[in-house]
Amino acid sequence: MSTEQNEKKLHSKRSIWLAIGVIFHLIYLWSIFDIYFVSPLVHGMNQHQSTLNAPAKRLFLIVGDGQRADKTLGKIYHPGSRKEEYLAPFLRSIILNEGTYGLSHTRMPTESRPGHVAMIAGFYEDVSAVTKGWKENPVDFDSVFNQSSHTYSFGSPDILPMFAQGATTGQVDTWMYGHEFEDFTSSSIELDKYVFNHFYQLLNNSTNNQQLNNQIRQDGNIFFLHLLGTDTSGHSYRPYSEEYYDNIKYTDKEIEKLVIEVGKFFGDNDTAFIFTADHGMSDFGSHGDGHPNNTRTPLICWGKGCNKPVKIDPKDNEFLNDKFENEDMSNWDLDNIKRHDVKQADIASLMSYLIGSNYPMNSVGELPIEFIDDSEINKIKGLYQNSLTLLEQYIVKLHEVKENQFNFKEFNKFEIKSIDNYMKDIEKVIELMNNNIDLESEAILLIEEFNSIILEGLDYLQKYNWLMIRSIVTLGFIGWIVYSFTIFLQMFIIPKDKLSIDINSKHYIQKFIFGSITAIMVFIFQYEKLPLNYYFYLIFPIFLWFEIFKFRIDLINGFNLFFKGLNINKKILIFIFIIIFFESIAIGFENRNIFTYIYLILSFTYPILLFKNTIFSTKKHILISLSWFTTCILLSLFPIQDPVKVESINMIVTSGLIMTIIGIIGFTFLQDKMTKIQKSIIIFQILLIILSIYSTLKAVVSLTNRNGLPLDAQIIGWSVLIISLIFPTILHSINSNSNYKIRFLIIFLTMAPTFNILTISFEGLFYILYSIMIFQWIEIESMSIKSNNNLKLLRISIIGFFNLQIAFFGTGNISSISSFSLDSVYRLLPIFDPFPMGALLMLKLIIPYALLSTGLGLINLRLGFQKYSITSLIISVCDLLSLWFFYMVKTEGSWLDIGVSISNYCLAIFGALFIAIVEVGSTIVLNGVHIEDVNIEEKKSKAILNLKIEDNNYKDIEKIINEDQLDDGSIGSRLKRRNQKIENVD
């Protein structure tokens, strides 16, 4: 095969490689959800009634969506009244006098759907459920509503339908407002007012409808009031705003009124009330991750069947021994009231018991008997029935797993003591309790132990195939890293005529071995009835390792060529440095100070590394070194900034004006190299930045003054965003300029208006400094002295990977995607719509990556590297980070730890995905860019350095070189003129 054919085949292979990379990362992104967070649902269980004697006739479940525990229970400074006050005095009086309180701990993702499923159905959905639909059930499950006599629900169209459609036909009635009500710029109280008004309207209608009246008055009914106001006001104005506080005060007053009206309507005191929240909210006005502000929600139970408060000595309050809890409870003034915390799924069991219904079939919650006012024997029986519900799930799950295993290993704790023995012991103690109530504590301990072991058993069965599937995913990651490095070596390091593409092309033995492995694994998967996703996880390691063994000679030879000339000690040092670097990046995911330290180190070591002893030899070297140092110092400040940013008009306007000034300065210095049309387009781009400042300023001022979003500001904002991204790009592609500096300026101006519209604080300044740093990086690398090209490529790839992290971490929270504020989105979308809003936030995230893609592409061109060589090397090593975080995913521990571990893995995977996007992006944005002959420039610099002052004709030659640098034109014409000048000197 000819060299030309080899090259053509390799470039085709590169395209296939990129396509494989994108698919690989998207599929393996999902792997943690299939491994660590599998849906626990099983079907076919027998149901168990919670109690034969229901304590209450009916139940009201009131959910303050997004209502934080500390704001509900604590004494808060109200910015409107300018005094400290309790925002929920009625609920507080219930805690002090009438009911039992505690905190309900949610799980990540702290979103509305998973939160409501946990409290109403009693189980925790797999994390992926939030992507399957906000309104419909992605899987079938039972709920407390379905087990009630009838449920009347009022509230959001995003929550109510998923329980109504999953229930028995006609079991759940819904009263919902339209999506247009969820306007973040309007009063959130109107949403909750709708709920209370329609509930009262239902009661009023029943007075004229006997059938409805009988239905409402039957025992075992549930009334569900979903109050979205706090969530809406928190998103709009933050959970420390006057609006958020007023919404809590409003719902508290309405709940007080509701209790009175319910008592009057039913004419009895047989109603139980539960107030809680589906999730909390960060100070940033967002939720989704595992931060304590998102996972800690209030739980208050009062009315029929609910225990009265238990007064204790504050010294006996166990929560005060914990530093975090002590600080959090410092302004609650509830130290003398016993607090009972529960898991969110426990609420479903509590509701079931209060109305005497069956426990939901899929519930994994444990009955919190501390909240219940009933005889001890009834509570113990209810707790045992709860255990039997858990046991039903264990038995079904055991059957599912066991029948599909070659050699099933039983759960060891049930081998030590069997299920039958546990049941006999518990039933015996319950029987004895009829005559000796003092055995209550013993019965509780036995049942809690049984529950705990059942849940452990369920967890064991859930994780039964972990070892196999995690091994497959690990082999996939390692295979991808080695395979990608092999592709890189084949494309950029190994001479094309030395490739082993056709050597041993049939690979009979290798095909037989890998074919056999595939057949065995597929047979095992089929026998164990593993889900389809597992086959996708298997395909990659089989394919990748087949390719690695196929081209193992290229891998070995290319590796030796890449590090040619280095002794073993230097190679070891390089590998140690790479390991330390990636470990530092991994630590930086949890401690952003690491990124600051790296910037500080780069600020002075990078110029020294590039210029060595020539750093002070020329003005250019001194100037670029100083400017690099200054930019890195300034950029080092961004990773350590609080990601919880407050909207700042001054910052927005300042950054917008600086963008405009940079555009004007760049235009002034480069206009001589532009055509008339290009000048007009760039002026138009600068005007778009000014227009974005105007529309953003008008929107922010109006929203801040609670006057809603002006229509003209919304129209201008959308128009600028669309026009700035699309039309200049099209116009410049038609009238392209090959000068790389002009192209970089064009790209900077293209994205500046959009970034300015979506900024809320210092992000605009980050965009400016990040752009400057990328440009300086291009220049400083092009001036660097000649060195080993492969090591230079490795160095640039490592710095490029670091800049890839900064592209995200410079403006975002390291541990939480939910920390990106929706404030900027309200300037374009005032009505809640999660997917378009998420798309706008993603657009904001992508912009720095586009700048990086431009920079890497230009460095490729300036240094004469082969096209895509830098990004290809980055792609081949960046998944070391993904593999690290794959094993760092946590399913136990604090909610914060679990949430952060998932976020870190997702960010690492997306970083690898963005590298592939960066490569494609650089190709598009740099199409047609022309770079002057770098080698000629290096020769000129080298000539100046080598000549001595006393050499003849030194000044004349230096003058010619300096004049030549000012000349314009093609490389050929410049060389011709320079030769003529040298001849004249001679």
Image: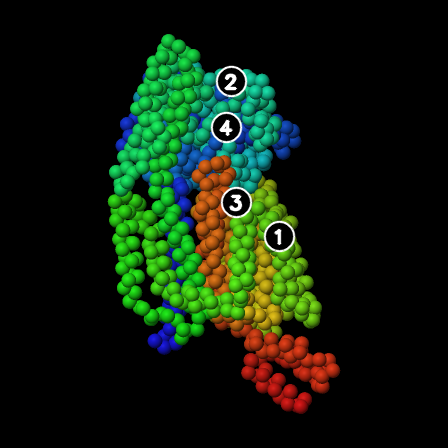
Q: CA distance from mark 4 to mark 3?
A: 24 Å
Amino acid type, callout 3? Ser
Residue designated by label 3: 815
CA–CA distance in space, label 3 to label 2: 38 Å
Q: Are marks 4 and 2 in contact (CB under 8 Å)?
A: no
Q: Nearer the viewer, residue 948 or 665?
A: 948
Element at badge 4? strand
Say whether disc 3 or disc 2 marks the residue closer to the N-terminus.
2
Q: Quadrant of the N terminus?
A: bottom left
Left or right of 702 in this view: 363: left
Disc 1 target residue:
597
Could you give the CA–CA distance between mark 3 and mark 1, rounded to whole angstroms?
19 Å
Question: In the image, is residue 284 above or below residue 83?
Answer: below
Query: How far apart are the alpha carbons under marks 4 and 2?
Result: 14 Å
Q: Which mark is residue 309?
A: 2
Number of numbered markers? 4
Q: Is residue 371 left or right of residue 320?
A: left
Q: Earlier in the sequence, mark 2 or mark 1?
A: 2
Amino acid on which disc 4 is placed: Leu
Q: Give whichever of discs 1 and 4 has the lower sequence position.
A: 4
The label nearer to you, 2 versus 1, is 1
Residue drawn at 27 percent across, 47 percent down: 524
